[in-house]
Image: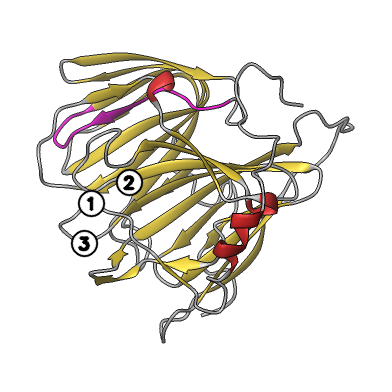
């Protein structure tokens, strides 16, 4: 397997009205899905054996699903703090109307759970790590926030020059201490908050994934807005925000296990780094919120 087999630049997964579609049509991909669209109107997803979470990336949207109808106020950009989001259960068609960029996380499921809405002020916001490993995590689609059978969804903001998804870790084996989960990374990048960046800049970050056993994976990539990295197995991380540019990613996870849980194993060569955070302070640039203006 060649380097970056599991990396899909913006536009390479386009399908109809969707800028990107990840589903089981991709060889070797089974448990998770993602759709991203730029809307100025509406898009409809049919009912099926799939559960979904609708996440505004930029803009506001109305979501109609069965008897449910939610107004998602959204945000100006992914760097303006958390957004409200909603969950749609299996066997329910979804219509999304609005202007902006929207993501739909998906997972095959069998349990019939009720639809649900989570307001932006209710989203658990976590400042994870310390020093140059500080990042901001929005845990809207995890157990304890939005209920689901399989889906685990969150998003991460990494300010310029910081590292996230670090230390490298894996969740590719079902054990008492680890979950077996596929993972999708959808990336966006922008000039760092407050930076006096000229026109024409091309914001980017870096991402890596590598083998944890005899299954080959080798991703070492420059990532920009709209790029998608898939992690079917193996160690993944770091995701690095380049100097001058903030980095965002949406994570979608699900797997074959009965329990909806995120349990990880650090690469033993690098797990010691976590203990170094005890003597460091979190990055004072975080949290990002909508009260500030992003350059």
Q: Position of residue 144 (x, y in %)?
A: 27, 37
**Among numbered discs 1 and 2, the one appearing first in the sequence:** 2
Q: Residue at x 28, y 57 (%)?
A: 31
Q: Position of residue 97 (x, y in %)?
A: 39, 17
Tell me if residue 42 can be seen.
no
Q: Which residue is mark 2?
A: 152
Q: Which range is magenta?
A: 81-93
Question: Tags 1 and 2 in contact by the CB under 8 Å rule?
Answer: yes
| Distance from Cα at disc 1 to Cα at disc 2 | 7 Å
Q: Residues within 10 Å of mark 2 (few under 14, many from 20)?
A: many
Q: Which residue is mark 1?
A: 260
Taking 169 as reference, is 38 above or below it? above
Q: Position of residue 121 (x, y in %)?
A: 43, 19
Q: Residues within 10 Å of mark 3 (few under 14, many from 20)?
A: some
The coloring applied to the image is secondary structure
| Mark 3 or mark 1, whichever is nearer to me | 1
Q: Closer to the camera, 173 or 126?
A: 126
Q: Secondary structure at mark 2?
A: strand
Question: Tags 3 and 1 in contact by the CB under 8 Å rule?
Answer: no
Q: Residue at x 80, y 28 (%)?
A: 194
**Side of 143 relative to 48 (left or right):** right
Q: Which mark is residue 256?
A: 3
């Amino acid at each position: 397997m060649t380097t970056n087999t599991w990396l899909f630049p913006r536009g390479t997964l386009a399908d109809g009205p969707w800028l990107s579609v990840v589903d089981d049509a991709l060889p070797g991909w089974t448990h998770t899905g993602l759709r991203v669209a730029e809307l100025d109107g509406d898009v409809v997803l049919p009912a099926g054996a799939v559960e979904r979470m609708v996440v505004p990336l930029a803009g506001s949207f109305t979501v109609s699903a069965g008897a449910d109808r939610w107004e998602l106020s959204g945000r100006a950009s992914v760097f303006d703090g958390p957004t409200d989001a909603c969950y749609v259960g299996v066997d329910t068609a979804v219509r999304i109307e609005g202007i902006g960029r929207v993501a739909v996380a998906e997972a095959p499921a069998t349990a019939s759970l009720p639809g649900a809405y989570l307001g932006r002020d209710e989203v658990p916001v976590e400042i994870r790590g310390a020093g140059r490993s500080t990042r901001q995590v929005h845990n809207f689609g995890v157990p304890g926030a939005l209920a689901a059978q399989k889906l685990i969804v969150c998003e991460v903001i990494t300010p310029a020059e910081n590292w996230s998804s670090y230390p490298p870790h894996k969740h590719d084996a079902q054990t008492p201490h680890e979950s077996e989960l596929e993972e999708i990374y959808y990336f966006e990048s922008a000039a760092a908050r407050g930076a006096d960046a000229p026109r024409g800049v091309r914001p980017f970050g870096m991402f890596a994934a590598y083998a944890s056993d005899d299954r080959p994976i080798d991703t070492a990539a420059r990532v920009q807005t709209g790029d998608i990295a898939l992690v079917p197995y193996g160690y993944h991380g770091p995701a690095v925000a380049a100097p001058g540019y903030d980095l965002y990613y949406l994570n979608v996870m699900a797997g074959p296990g009965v329990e909806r849980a995120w349990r990880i194993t650090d690469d033993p060569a690098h797990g010691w780094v976590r203990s170094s955070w005890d003597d460091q302070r979190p990055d004072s640039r975080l949290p990002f919120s909508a009260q500030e203006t992003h350059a």
